[in-house]
Amino acid sequence: MRTRQAQASRHPDPESFEGKTYSLRPASAVSDGYYEIIGHLTDTLLQSWANESELLVRIRTLGKQKRSLRRVLTNDTGSPDAHILRSLREALSAFTSGVQNHLRSLQGLDRWSRTLTLSEEQYHLCMVEIELVNRIYAGRFRSCDRKFAFLPHCLRDLSADCRSAQRDIDYVCKGCSEACNVNHASKTLRLYGVKPYIWMTANLSSLFRKVKKEGNSLGVLGIACIPELVRGMRMCLKHDVPVVGIPLDANRCARWWGEFYSNTVNEKKLESLLKD
């Protein structure tokens, strides 16, 4: 059976900041344009819904119907679901150009992975889900007694010898490289009273129970690729932990490509979630 590492027969295109399935900054130095589009798109969708929570429920319900999404797009002309899916495709398809090739390349057990097998329509729904969750829970997150951020190790400076060290909850950035995006994000998070960790070993369910038992309110900020971020945000909300999150600008780690490639996250978006 061929492994995912063996399948990685080419390198991502550096000119377009290519991800395996998505890139929020295709042919651009920053992902500001994506955040303008997702914000405007969500505002437009909300004109047909009572509030963010109702739209979020519908977006999540649609995301579970993978096999029928393409059929709704093709055959359904007038339903609210078709309107949502067509609006998302029109606005977001430029950011998900790699999905179809990726799905065709999957072999073996990878074809059964929920993370690896998201369809393009599901990616679009996840993008809106992240935006809605941020809008709904940002205030509660900022007001929590304790706030933690969990950052991916794939955001680090790949040319440097990482000196991060394990502390009370998980690994902590030691600021060894000025070119490291984990370092940059960690500095910003600390300015706003958020403790940043590189997520390597922490058991979040156990952490949530421990903090709540101590009588403290806890908020979480996550940074990850879109499929992993959505899964993590849902898990936090299942534990009634207010959560906000920012997707990596592309999925460029070894899980997707067989090796690591440098990555970024939008620092303007990060600071906007931290400000009152």
Image: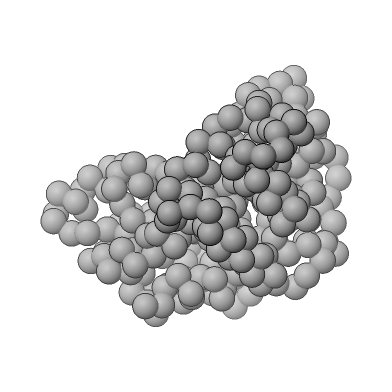
User: Looking at the rendering, which quadrant does residue 112 occupy?
Assistant: top right
Whether residue 32 is visible: yes
Q: Nearer the viewer, residue 194 or 199?
A: 194
Q: Which quarter of the rendered picture does the C terminus lie within?
A: bottom left
Seen in the picture, residue 104 relative to 261 is either above or below; the reply is above
Q: Quadrant of residue 14?
A: bottom right
2 or 129: nearer the eye? 129
The picture places residue 178, in percent across and down from the top left corner, at 59, 78
Residue 150 visible from this viewpoint: no
- What x and y, as percent, mark residue 188? 46, 76
Q: Please tell me which residue is depicted at 34% across the width and 67% down the height of the picture.
A: 139
* Residue 115 x, y percent position in the rendering: 59, 36
Is 131 placed left or right of 192 in the picture? Answer: right
Q: Which quadrant of the rendered structure holds the N terminus? A: top right
Residue at 15% in and 49% down: 213
* Colouring of the image: one colour
The residue at 53%/59% (across/down) is: 47
Residue nearest the observer in this picture, 239 or 257: 239
Q: Residue at x 21, y 53 (%)?
A: 211
Report the front residue among 81 and 238: 81
Report the number of discs. Answer: 0
Q: Is the residue 18 above or below the residue 174 in the image?
A: above
Q: Is residue 236 left or right of residue 156?
A: left
